[in-house]
Amino acid sequence: MDSQAYASATDTLPAEHGHPPFLRHHFESVSQQREAANFGMWVFLLTEVMFFGGMFCAYLIFRNWYHPAFVAGSNTLDITLGTTNTAVLIASSFTMAMSVYAAEIRRRGMLMFFLACTIVLGFVFLGIKGVEYHQKFVDHHVPGPSFSIEEFVHPSNPKALALTPDMAEKTQLYFSLYFLMTGMHALHMIIGISLLFFLLWRAYQGAYTEGHVMPIENFGLYWHFVDIIWIFLFPLLYLISRYR
Amino acid sequence: MSSTIISLPDQTTARLPRKSYLNQEYGLKSWLLTGDHKRIAILYLISITFFFIIGGILAGLIRMELLTPAADLMATDTYNKVFSMHGIIMIFLFLVPSVPATIGNFLIPLMVGARDLAFPKINLLSWYLYVIGGIFILAAMVLGGVDTGWTFTTPLSTHYLNTHVVTAAMGIFIAGFASIFTGLNFIVTVHRMRCPGMTWFRLPLFVWGHYATSIIMILGTPVLAITLVLVAMERLFDIGVFDPTKGGDPLLFQHLFWFYSHPAVYIMILPGMAVISEVISTFSRKRVFGYTAVAFSSVAIAVFGFLVWEHHMFIMGVSQYSALVFSLLTMLVAVPSAIKIFNWAMTMYQGSITFETPMLYAFGFFGLFTIGGLTGVFLATMGMDIHLTETYFVVAHFHFVMVGGMLMAYLAGIHFWWPKMTGRMYPEAISKLAAVVTFIGFIVTFFPQFLLGYLGMPRRYAAYPADFQVLNVFSTAGASILGIGYLLPLFYLPWSLIYGKIAGDNPWQATGLEWQIQSPPLTENFVEIPIMDHEAYDYEWLANKTQHEVQTVG
Amino acid sequence: MDLHNETVEHNRAEHAGEMHIVRPPVYLGIFFALLVLTALTTGMSYVDLGVFNAVIALAIACFKASLVVLFFMHIHYSSRLLKMTVGAGLFTFMLLISLTMTDYISRAWGRF
């Protein structure tokens, strides 16, 4: 069949049968489509690594330069809330992993349950983060005109080390990075939760339990990646020399 | 030796194919919502041409201002805005997407034997992001401009300027994601969509070049994105990361910015090299000499490109020990580039060379890129760099590589694949004239700038000592010639859409898979997914195939 | 056409590992391991180990991240291509950090 005959044939012939509806026309097989999507997601995560990489680089430099300020800043964070949040996020990663499993064994109810759990845990994380942010505003620890170094020069806790005013100024840099990194992480969470609502709705329609696991799988990769970022943020921001 | 290899069908009977990607569907909507990589390539082609014209007009303004020693055509801060916008538009909206998003987008699926890129919707999204980014940058220009230079140097950009830095940075951020998505699509397509028999070492070198480019796009661009976010945060919320008065470090900005922006010059040149490999092979009728070496040199350039960024910062107060390391690493990049040049030269050696327009542009690329590349080695040497950096020597160097190299290669590619994209030939005589005029105009424009820089004329100033005027007049005169060289294709290429000769499937007798299908191609590219059973650039295979067809048909 | 089908089949076989379904006990095990490691890293930060506090905190974080990548994200069961992709990301990140650090570490060493 030459190309012109083919071109006119596609006008009249119905779409080829025997393919699942989610197989896009330019892929040869379902497995090719799935591998391409999976690999594409990983390549996207590479860009995310480098995106956060720039901030980690800045963090590393300033932490080495202004270590005392970073210790003092870190010690003002609430360790209980931080640790709880880490656990919450790990739990949400676990429920997300279970969602992938549910989609793979084609259980719609189970899939919806775990997706919903992930959404709830995501909101819990953001809620706790909100409480922490609020506390920073109350303490005047948000970089900007209202930033106060009072707490670091004359600590209310007698055991804490007092910083010189010069070094105490540098805590602002710590909090800048804190808000930047956790804020960027929270932004990723918000995007993730929005996507989760969409996935939940499509899962309700049964879209992912007929063999088309790929969207759930790929979203899972994204969600776990956001979890990994937090796994690093937690010790870097919360756990600097806690023993002081 | 015949003077040409063009073999067109009999013009009295030849017709364009009745069905092709161009007339599969009609209407604006069918273009704006298309998933077809070929249509998206055309969309990109139109939009980057638009931005090229704007950037070109700004370049013309710069050269006009520099005709006289005094700052008389425009105020000095207008001049700052003009060269900044010229740089931003040309780099982020023209050079970075030029070959990959147009020719690459069009050809990579055809070359690997796939029906489309792996993610057509993401490909379309990439174009929309590009357009939105472009609108932001245009908005920044119209609302009052940006005068930071294209490098957004801190703390100038964060604390001392009151122009639309954030808007422009947003535009670049968004356009950056367009290039990330293009790169992502290419990588997945090359890995996962190759047709049966298409092994890695049967891929055309065009695909290798784009694969290497894509690596830089996906690994480098996000670093630029976060850097621009930090600049915006610094301006909006005063976070202090780049502000020395708060303990921040402006050099950190330079590190992060050049971590992308140096590899970015390889985003700009590698696709150009990819085009040249195809053109040289076709018009020498020989397999590219040292195929493997050329293929790996592309990847080597991509990897080495990440190891050299600090050479932009030698005079900025970085550690001298570190500068020493980077100086050495920078010279390493010359090695894979030289491998390419030598292999292309060897490809032409004893080949049946013909001088069609793409080949003329490729010759232009050779000369200009070699000069541009070698002066890059001067700049990598720390002692020379201290003398030459921030002078017109640097300006001339990167224009030789980017304009002389990349733009020549881009035009070579556009002419080479024009028959495939449109089904029609461009007019041969006038296009050869354009290629020659471009080359002459380029040399006259930028060669004097090497001398100016060596004599010490700094870049980015509207006024200069009267001693420098002669060379500047040369440069401006050359720019006028160069402008004509670029205007010609803008007229004759659209003209050829209607009046050009019918090209037929394979006017160049080239071997790539894309030449074995009709031109312009079908929306589905291939009637049946091809099976690759020969090496790339196998002209014997093509000759046998043609002979076989003649026998069966005749 | 035969060659065609063969290659497609071959590709499928080559990457069959990707279709591996990870069972819930594995996920549960990793989940608890991550929780224990979180508790451990928080606890360790209250012990004064000098410079090793940071080292241990980062080591634990890296270990946790590897667990997530290998099992939650299925890299343990994936093709070599995906393993290399992860490696490429780490490699480039390390390039960014280490080459930037060449400047910051030696800036105070003074002039030649």
Image: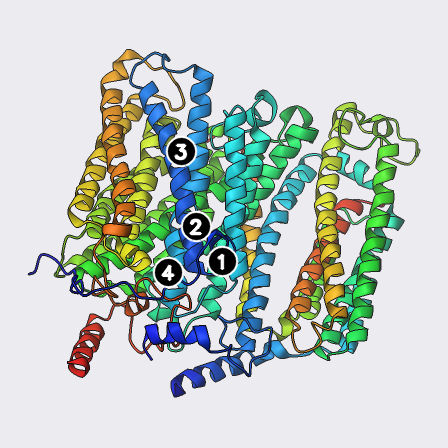
Chain-order first, disc 1 or disc 3: 1
Q: Can residue A232 be seen in this view?
A: yes
Q: What residue type is labelled 4?
A: Leu
Q: Mark 3 lies on which chain?
A: B
Residue at left offset 56%, top offset 77%: A30
Binning the other alpha carbons within 10 Å of mark 2 as few (below 14), some (14 to 19) or many (20 upward) gives some
Residue of label 3: B54
Secondary-structure class at tag 3: helix
Q: Mark 1 lies on which chain?
A: B
Q: For this view, does B161 lie left or right of residue A87?
A: left
Residue C84's spot in the image, x, y percent? 54, 65
Q: For this view, does B175 lie left or right of residue B108?
A: right
Chain-order first, disc 2 or disc 1: 1
Determine if marks 1 and 3 fall on one subunit: yes
Q: For this view, does C78 lie left or right of residue A204?
A: left
Residue at left offset 23%, top offset 49%: B362
Residue of label 1: B34
Residue of label 4: B107
Q: Which amino acid does label 3 sit on?
A: Ile
Q: Compute the Cα span from label 2 to label 1.
A: 10 Å
- The quadrant in which residue B299 appears is bottom left
Res B302 label: none
Q: Which amino acid does label 1 sit on?
A: Thr
Binning the other alpha carbons within 10 Å of mark 3 as few (below 14), some (14 to 19) or many (20 upward) gives some
Q: Which amino acid does label 2 sit on?
A: Leu
Residue B177's spot in the image, x, y percent? 55, 48
Q: Compute the Cα span from label 3 to label 2.
A: 17 Å
Q: Compute the Cα span from label 3 to label 4.
A: 27 Å
Q: Nearer the viewer, mark 2 or mark 4?
A: 2
Q: Do the residues labelled 2 and 4 touch (CB within 8 Å)?
A: no
Q: Compute the Cα span from label 2 to label 4.
A: 14 Å
